[in-house]
Each structure stands twice: as structure tokens, then as C-alpha cells.
Image (cartoon, rainbow, N blue to C red):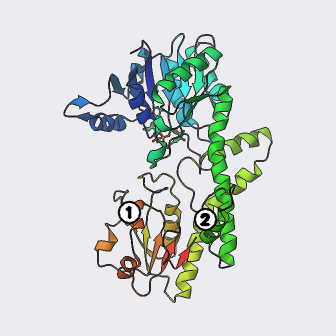
Amino acid sequence: MSNNKIAILGLGYVGLPLLIAFSRFYEVIGFDISSKRINDIKSSTTINNKSLVNDVFFTSKKSKLSDANIYIITVPTPLNEDNSPDLSKIKLATEIVAQNISQGNIVIYESTVYPGVTEDFCVPIIEKISKLNYNKDFYCGYSPERISPGDERFTLNKMIKITSGSTPSVADFIDDMYKKIIGAGTYKASSIKVAEAAKVIENIQRDVNIALINELAIIFDGMNLNTNEILEAAKTKSNFIPFKPGLVGGHCISVDPYYLSYKSMKLGVNADIINVSRKINDNMSNFIVDKTINILIKKNINIINSDILILGYTFKENCADTRNTKVKDIIYQLMKKKINIEIYDPYVENNNDFNFIENPFLNEKKYDCIIVAVSHNQFKNYKVDDFIKISKGKLVLLDIKGMYNFSTWKL
Ligand SMILES: NC(=O)c1ccc[n+]([C@@H]2O[C@H](COP(=O)([O-])OP(=O)(O)OC[C@H]3O[C@@H](n4cnc5c(N)ncnc54)[C@H](O)[C@@H]3O)[C@@H](O)[C@H]2O)c1
């Protein structure tokens, strides 16, 4: 153990694995604003009164943070109603650090932001509250998280981690710290702003590419051509990039582009491609609802009081994360049309928002239409007979993820 003591603020999807990894090398304080979250973590990381994380002190009391000399902030950076960046959580975490920080300390941000949030938004807050001077009395760093929820291939340890620091020696220090916990190694960016920008464009590149494929999917659908078949053929070209059409939800790809778009607007630059891609991807739920209604009409099924089963609710396959899921938009729109909706997702616990049900394939209930919205591995095994068994008449299967070769319609 070194003399350094790390405090991690925000113990969610990003903060908790980071805390577990650093606890193998450093004394760590785990801080979360939510005392419920702290209690849940304490009980889930303790088995038979034995802690699974070494030298970790968990707290939701901000006064307990002054023992640390390195602060890592991993709090959410969501959007406001108007899609502008909601920096309130990162501001509060920064204020808490500023009340505890002392001479020589380092503050590292991991939350996704637009370039400039660390040095132009957060640093002045720290200076004002702590009365310390940046790069004289305290230092900063930025090291974005890149984990991909639900994908075991891309966990914290397995992906190169970008690091950066506010002076060359602080950048080296931060890089060495992360090298200890990241098996795949680190990439030291030339500045904090470069590191911030690199993170945000990773997700923007994905959003823009998916938007293009979604636009193509809508065009080809109008021509009765199946986009999946076209993509299979096109990808035999060596440099064709294999993106797929679909809903873009979650707290990263559907959020981060708005951060850069906001910053570019402040600069007077139009982020045209970024903005139109967001619009196209956000509109996919409307397209799927319209498609569903058209298919029901064509099949002579009465829309009002029809029964639709939706398979999959999370924003992405094989994980329990429902944040910003676009399946919710589909459900709301179908419910507005007085359609009865039941939802089955093996990853989602029944909540009171919607009519979540247990495995429908084990029940007697029958449906007018089934929409497969998320490609969870469990759904891949279903055969045509399984779907027919729970269908009222002829099978009407809308397959958003292109999973089956017997679907009525595929995106
Ligand atoms: N989840 C991912 O896969 C992922 C991947 C890359 C980047 N990110 C980014 O990392 C950041 C954190 O995301 P997350 O998914 O871990 O969020 P999360 O919602 O899972 O967890 C955040 C935690 O922070 C706590 N919190 C909120 N405000 C706080 C404050 N002021 N002080 C201390 N704790 C506070 C919350 O109670 C919560 O437990 C975001 O900027 C996100 O965009 C997330």
C-alpha cells in the first residue's frame, strides 16, 4: 500500500468496479450521496461478515472525505429536459471535494463531459470554495470510463484507459496509478481537454453511424427490401463497417452527443451531422410504432384492445440497465392507442410502471402481435412454434433486432 488515499465519489456502474480495482493497491474511501446506495454496497460486498474489498471505508458523509489526497469523481452527467447538459451532479460532487481538499491533492474526473468541463467549469468551483490555486496547490486529471454494460469482453480491466493530467508530472502520476489496475494498459493523452473530447467522440461516432443505418433501414423498408440482408451482402467488402439498425437508448450514446452539440452551439458552430443523427435515432420508436399499426391493420386486427407482447425492455441486450430505454417510448405510444401491452424481460424485475409479466411461454395467454425489442441471449433460442403457441391467430412477429428467419417483419 502506498501513502496515497483515494476517495471515489459516485458508486454506480462506473464508480464501484473502479473502487474494487483500486482497493487492491490503495486505501480507498467510497462515497455516495445516497445512503441507501452505501448500505446496499456494504451488504453486497460483505459475505459472512468478511469484506470482499480491502481497506475500503464506505460513507455518505462528506466530512469523512478530508483524509483522502486523490479524489475521483464518477457521478452521472445526464441531460436537462431541453437536452442541454445537466451538470448539477458533477457540480455538487466538485463542491464536496472542494470543501475537503488540501495542499497537493489531485482531483480526477471520469464522468463523460464536453471538452472544458473539468478545467473551465469545475476548477473555478474548487478554487473559489477551497481558496487553493489550480496547478499550484491542487491538480486535476481526466480519465474517461469506457465499459460497455452487459459485455464481458469490455470490462474495466480489459480496455485501454485514457489518462491525462493538468501538468506533465501529474499526468505521469495519474497514468501510473491507472496502469496498476488496467491489464490492457493506458493511453496518456496530451491534455485534459483532449481526453474529454476523445471520450465524447467515441459515442458520437457510434450514434452517427447507427443513424445512417437507421435512415437506410427506413428507405429500404419503403422498398420492401430487408436491411439485414443488404448489410450481410455489403459487409463482404473489406472496409464496410458492420453497424446495425435499431433503437439507441441508454445513458451514453443517446446522451453524450448532446454534450458536444451544446458546446459547439456556444462556439457558434452548427453540429449538423451530430444533431440530425440524434433526431433520426430518437425517431426510430415512432417508426416502429407506425409500422406496428400498419401491420395490425393489414392483418385485419382491431387496434383498440388488441394484446401486444413486448419481449425485452432494457436499453441493450444481456444487461439489466433500463436507463433511457427507447422501448419505453414504444410502449407509451402503443398504450395511447388503447392497445394492451404486456412486457417480458428476464433482466428486469417487475415494477409498477408497466405490465411486466413472468415468462409468457409458460403461460396460456395469447397475443395479437409480439414485438421482440431487445436481443437478449435467452430470446435467441425461441422457435417459430413457441411464438405460434402464444399467438391468437396467425403469428404476427415484429423483430426489431433481426433475430429470427420466421418474423413477419424485421427492421
Ligand atoms: N455506465 C456506463 O457504462 C458508463 C460508461 C462510460 C461512461 N459513463 C459515465 O460515467 C458517469 C457515471 O455513470 P454511471 O453509469 O456510473 O452512473 P450511475 O447512475 O450508475 O451511478 C452514479 C452514482 O453517483 C451517485 N451520485 C450522484 N450524485 C452524487 C454526488 N454529488 N456525490 C456523490 N455521489 C453522487 C449516485 O447516487 C449513484 O450511485 C456518467 O458521466 C456516465 O456518462 C458510464
Q: Which of 191 and 337 is in front in this view?
A: 191
| Numbered label tally | 2
**23 left or right of 374?**
left
Mark 1 = which residue?
378
Seen at 78% across and 38% down, the residue is: 267
Query: Label 2 crowding class (10 Å Cα cut-off): few <14, some 14-19, many 20+?
Result: many
Disc nearer the start of the sequence (1/2):
2
* Label 1, label 2: how far apart the Cα atoms are: 24 Å
Q: Quarter-wise, where is residue 347 in the image?
A: bottom left
Percent of width and height locating residue 397: 48, 77
Q: Can you tell me whether the CB of the residue at mark 2 lies under 8 Å from the nearest atom of ligand 1?
A: no
Q: Regarding mark 2 in the picture, which secondary structure is present there?
A: helix
Q: Which of marks 1 and 2 is in front?
A: 1
Residue 95's disc is none
Q: In which quarter of the image is the C terminus?
A: bottom right
Looking at the rendered structure, the kind of residue marked 1 is Gln
Percent of width and height locating residue 333: 53, 69
Mark 2 = which residue?
284
In the image, residue 163 sits, relative to residue 405, either above or below, namely above
Q: Regarding mark 1 in the picture, which secondary structure is present there?
A: helix
Percent of width and height locating residue 36: 34, 38
